[in-house]
Image (spheres, rainbow, N blue to C red):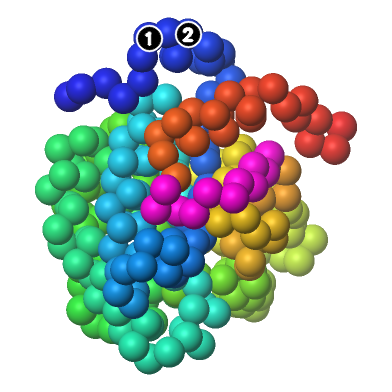
Amino acid sequence: MTKIYLMEEMALLDKKKIPFHVAIIMDGNRRWEKKQGLPLLSGHNYGADNLNRIVRAACELGIKVVTVYAFSTENRSRSKLEVSFLSSLFEKYMVEQRELLRKEGVRLDCIGAWKKMSPNIQKVVEETKEFTKNGKNIDLVIAVNYGGRDEIRRASIRMVEDVEKKILTKEQITEDLFSQYLDTSKWPDPDLLIRTGGEKRLSNFLLWQASYAEMILIDTLWPDFSEKHLFDAVLEFQKRNRRKGG
């Protein structure tokens, strides 16, 4: 496969300081389509296509986990047309991209209340997770029907249930233990969080996990977010002094 980055570019990076986990709020699809004069909702298609390019670039940089905010619990309040379109696009992505994901060593997973979505979506998620489970190069984690507050609520319920079952006591509850009840328990917290589209808020994304993530907020709309933008974000990340409150 053709390399994305030149050797001269890669030499600018400290291989020991590559962020292990990068989270991305993919914002700006609707504004992008309007700016381009394209049909309603077409921006989401371009955004989905861009995801493949960015995951491939992340893998080449040595990033091991990419978590993307695809469909939030709040998105469900949008028009029925858009919600239906986004659901169909997600299902289509799972089916059409699974072969490419496996070929490129991408292991797919999902977080959020995706098991509350349609039976068809639940089925394709399970199938795609199974199909790509042996991917060793990078994990692509898609947050779908996801909200940070809802995730914390669901984790709290599971923990309370375990206390009631006497699996654990309230005295045993620590931050580390609570993290094990979150959707993201399989992965370390994100080191770097990127938001495209010019907004400057978390929008209910990874509220617990992003506590000490370095944030890079850029004006570029998601369909225009390129491999160069990702490279520059990693380069900026490496310049930060990550004290984590210490």
Check disc 1 and give the amino acid type. Met
Residue 168, quarter of the rendered image: bottom right
Residue visible at 34% across and 49% down?
Answer: 51
Residue visible at 62% across and 55% down?
Answer: 198
Q: Which residues are magenta?
A: 214-224
Image: 79 above or below 125: below
Determine whether, in the image, residue 123 is placed left or right of residue 70: left
Residue that protrudes farthest toward the front in the picture: 37
Check disc 2 and give the amino acid type. Ala
Q: Residues within 10 Å of mark 2 (few under 14, many from 20)?
A: few
- Asked if the magenta segment contains residue 217, the reply would be yes
How many numbered discs, if any? 2
Determine whether, in the image, residue 194 is placed left or right of residue 225: right
Residue visible at 57% across and 33% down?
Answer: 233
Name the spot of residue 48 as percent of width and height, x first: 31, 57
Image: 60 above or below 74: above
Determine whether, in the image, residue 153 is placed left or right of residue 39: right
Image: 220 above or below 135: below
Give SS at disc 2.
Answer: loop
Can the viewer see residue 185 in this picture? no
Name the spot of residue 35 as percent of width and height, x first: 44, 63
Can the viewer see residue 123 in this picture? yes
- Residue that label 2 marks: 11
Point out the image quarter for the C terminus: top right
Residue 245, quarter of the rendered image: top right
- Asked if the magenta segment contains residue 226, the reply would be no
Image: 230 above or below 33: above
Point out the image quarter for the N terminus: top left
- Residue that label 1 marks: 7
Q: Are marks 1 and 2 in contact (CB under 8 Å)?
A: yes
